[in-house]
Amino acid sequence: MRAAAHTRYGPPSVLRLVETPTPVPRDDELLVTVFASTANRTDEGFLRGSPRIVRLFSGLTKPKKQILGNEFAGRVEAIGATVSTFRVGDRVFGYDGANFGGHAEAKTVRERGLVAVIPANMSYEEAAPGAEGAHYAVNLIRAARIGAGQRVLVNGSTGAIGSAAVQLLKDAGANVTAVCDTKNVGLVQSLGADRIIDYLREDFTDIDDAFDVIIDAVGKSSFRRCRALLKPRGIYLSSDLGFLAQNPILALTTPLFRRKRVMFPIPFDRKEDVLLLSDLMKSGKFRPVIDRTYPLDDIVAAFDYVETGTKVGNVVIRIREG
């Protein structure tokens, strides 16, 4: 099978298209023929081995997982002896942040992993970006216990995490203020935001308002800058470590004062989450935002684009036609 692989850390140019054996599923695994995947910030970090802390998981001097792609969408080609909830021929999508492998024509995934059936009204390419950013958004919303009637500000509302968060927050009944740039105002309106702040015209940290929760989905703000916008027991969450890795530290120290606080939840991979996302996509309450689609042959260009930091939503990789 064809795959994009890297044998050393570095920029996107270290990726090479190679032929590699098709994996064989274990008793509790599915073999999935992959039609689409994505290139995202997580993949980028493991490609470069940066920040250095990721090398504790990916390999200190060279990558253990040479085929990236933590999201996938495809067709079940074979199942292990103990698999009971999927059948050969099922169309599935999912997230595999431990083993990756989506940038190949086939991969295995555990039945109990983050894998679910693709809604009938969606293509492989539409479903492929339905799990990574969205499952991070689910983790943030769950950690802060955001519910109906709460006022939430989302900074970075057009990224993979932010665009999912806006939709999931609206489904939870929250009142959502979203921050984006001028050209994406229409997109964010379509996601359901109640109020939109164009950061090219107005600094959102200067507005006269108060929020129960602020989610920084791009890591370009800070608790210090956003603190004045929080209600007395408000919560600040970020998808990024922050300057000098301050967010995990603040998550430990700010709760001691029982006032405005930082949360930096460690994301948990729960089967229930991908099943929820599948249901929300089926009902139309959540649709992954897609910026561009690249064929596997152009995966270097796809990662070059991701590294510009200007992508809107998700960058899809077409592994094969289907």
Image: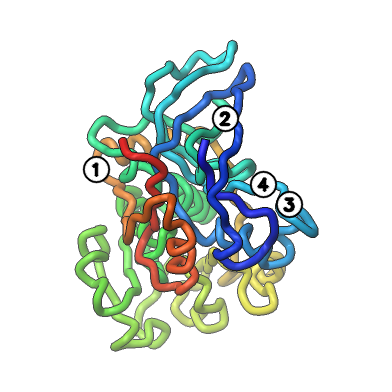
Q: First in sequence, mark 1 or 3: give its number.
A: 3
Q: Which residue is drawn at 50% across and 13% down?
A: 84
22 relative to 71 in the view: left or right:
right
- Return the residue nearer the eye: 269 or 176: 269
Q: Distance between the residues labelled 2 and 3?
A: 24 Å
Taking the spot 33% from the left edge, 35% from the top edge, the residue there is 279
Q: Which of 236 and 309 is in front in this view?
A: 309
Q: Mark 2 points at which residue?
A: 22
Residue mark closest to the camera, 2 vs 4: 2
Of the two numbered discs 2 and 4 on the same chain, state the one appearing first in sequence. 2
Q: Earlier in the sequence, mark 3 or mark 4?
A: 3
| Residue highlighted by disc 1 | 284
Can you say which quadrant of the picture contains the C terminus?
top left
- Mark sitting earlier along the chain (1/4): 4
Above or below 149: residue 206: below
**Mark 4 lies on residue:** 65
Disc number lying in front (1 or 2)? 2
Looking at the rendered structure, the kind of residue marked 2 is Thr
